[in-house]
Amino acid sequence: MKPRFIALLAAALLVVATHASAQRGADGHLNIIYWQAPSILNPFLSGGTKDIESASLVIEPLARYDEQGNMVPWLAEEIPTVANGGVADDLMSITWRVAEGITWSDGTPLTAADVAFTAEYCMHPEGGCAQLSSFEHVESVTAIDDRTVEIKYSTPKPFPYGPFVGATSPIIQKAQFQNCLGTSAPGCTDANFMPIGTGPFVVTEFRPNDVISMVANDNYRDPDKPAFASLTFKGGGDATAAGRAVLETGEFDYAWNLQLNPDVLTNMEAAGNGKILASFGTAVERIMVNLTNPDPDLGDERSTRAHPHPFMSDLAVRQALSMAIDRDILNEIGYGSTGRPTCNVVPAPAIYASDANDACLVQDVAGANAKLDEAGWVIGSDGIRAKDGVRLSILYQTSTNAVRQDFQALIKQWWSEIGVETELRNVDASVFFGGDPGSPDTFQKHFADLEMYTNLFDGTDPENYLNTWRCDNEPNPGNGWQGVNIPRYCDPAYDAMLEEMAGTADLDERVRLTKAMNDKLMQEVVMIPLIHRGRVSAHSNSLGGIKMNVWDSELWNAADWFRQ
């Protein structure tokens, strides 16, 4: 064996040995940057990815998905199944066992009562829970003893892993949140900003839409983890600045969601300070249609199902808008090899991806014009189509981001070619994805005709995600604008397919139903899918232990990160 190889092998083994025996906090400080700044650390009050992922450093679920999409126990002893007795033979209940010896960061034990309380918190009839779709068909959640919790369903549930699985459904401490139920939830600032958790880090300071300071959790279940004594989670700015901070200047260790032109990313990586991570999961950049009227004159009934949209209610209009878009050009300028044009909202795993909607992959401006002509939308002297006194004049909003603004500009031009007037608006990402019920600018309120962003689902089973578009899941004043059905879609036929899927264990049937629901949403143009996005982030060369995860929080294994 060559001496150089022996030396390299010895050095590698030394690194492994050093980190196998490393002490908690031995690697000093960790710097993370998310250009979409967190506004809250309670995923139940925000559907924003930046809030869910920052919170995942502190509060954790019973189980989560690893980098391969496999479900793994986290705060639970094991994954309940029919085979091990954890899932009832009739599929009407699932029983979880909390792992022994886990404590909250304040030193008190995690118990089944905390798990049951978390369900009570999200399912409270007077509250607005952003993750309510994870609790679909849950009839009761009961703490049987200190470590055993039983979830009963109102229908057989072949896939009973909605509640408490993945970063979107973590466990919160009953003692901290017990006075924050229902309408009181948004006002519990201390709990929402500084939750007591079981994760590797503890929040010491939280400045909304700016920065979070954390330290290692002294009561974390592994005495040698995390390797970092403290952490700064910086938010704000833009994707370009975040990428440079890791790849060029070395100021930060990890940068998330680098939604940048591929040439820009390549040039940044050439500086030699860090590496780009990319992997495809279920993320789709899409334009969400508002099927309801966002007119401010409607007051509290604005963007609610009380008032259908004056022109987005016309399927021909929605179809024409989609037909006019050239997705290949969008992908070329925005994503390159880290994106793929798509006509589906469920693009992965591959077995669930439909090919029934692929016509959208080819731009058809002439066809879009013909469709609007046929529907009676006539081009006026100003070049804008109108019908019965209603003009096709659109407010199209998204978050502030260079790629998204490029998309807006191109799409506005294409829509002008079919007689549609478009006003563009962009909102700071921290506000847009923040979920503040007092702000008019959140994506949940959807006070626009169309809005563009990316969404995705945890794990590899799409059932909970498809529940997003169930009737009555929409944000409205009654639930603090915390619903997830952003288009305000409601179709009993769609809901019937959801019910069928909820009781279907056969994989082939689940695939059939997933494709059918995806196709229904696409063919009714409830949203306009654009790009199946790869998750693109970056880390410094000195940061080790990272396992890129597109099925859960990217920070899912931050307890294992170390300085190398």
Image (cartoon, helix red, strand yellow):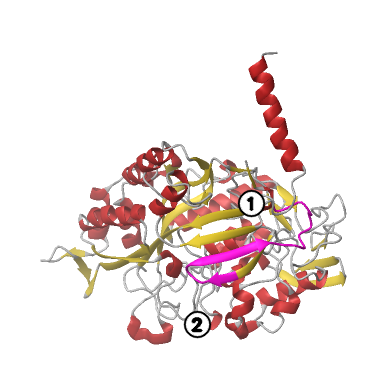
Q: Is residue 312 visible?
A: yes
The label shown at residue 459 is 1
Residue that mark 2 sits on: 477
Q: On the image, which quarter does residue 440 sit in?
A: bottom left
**Along the line of sight, the residue nearer the viewer: 47 or 294:** 47
Q: Say which residue appears at 43% left-offset and 39% top-offset.
A: 269
Question: Is 182 part of what is drawn in magenta?
Answer: no
Q: Mark 2 and mark 1: span between their CA atoms?
A: 30 Å
Residue 192: horizontal and vertical position, in percent?
61, 75
Residue 421: horizontal and vertical position, in percent?
22, 64
Q: Please give left or right for residue 351 compared with residue 413 in the image.
A: right
**Along the line of sight, the residue nearer the viewer: 502 or 101:** 101
Q: On the image, which quarter does residue 232 sit in?
A: bottom right
**Along the line of sight, the residue nearer the viewer: 503 or 95:** 95
Around disc 2, counting alpha carbons within 10 Å, would you say few (fewer than 14), some (14 to 19), or many (20 or more)? some
Location of residue 425 with respect to 81 vertically, above or below: below
Question: Is 219 part of what is drawn in magenta?
Answer: yes
Magenta segment boundaries in residue numbering: 205-226
**Along the line of sight, the residue nearer the viewer: 476 or 370:** 476
Residue 28: horizontal and vertical position, in percent?
63, 53
Q: Is residue 517 visible?
A: no
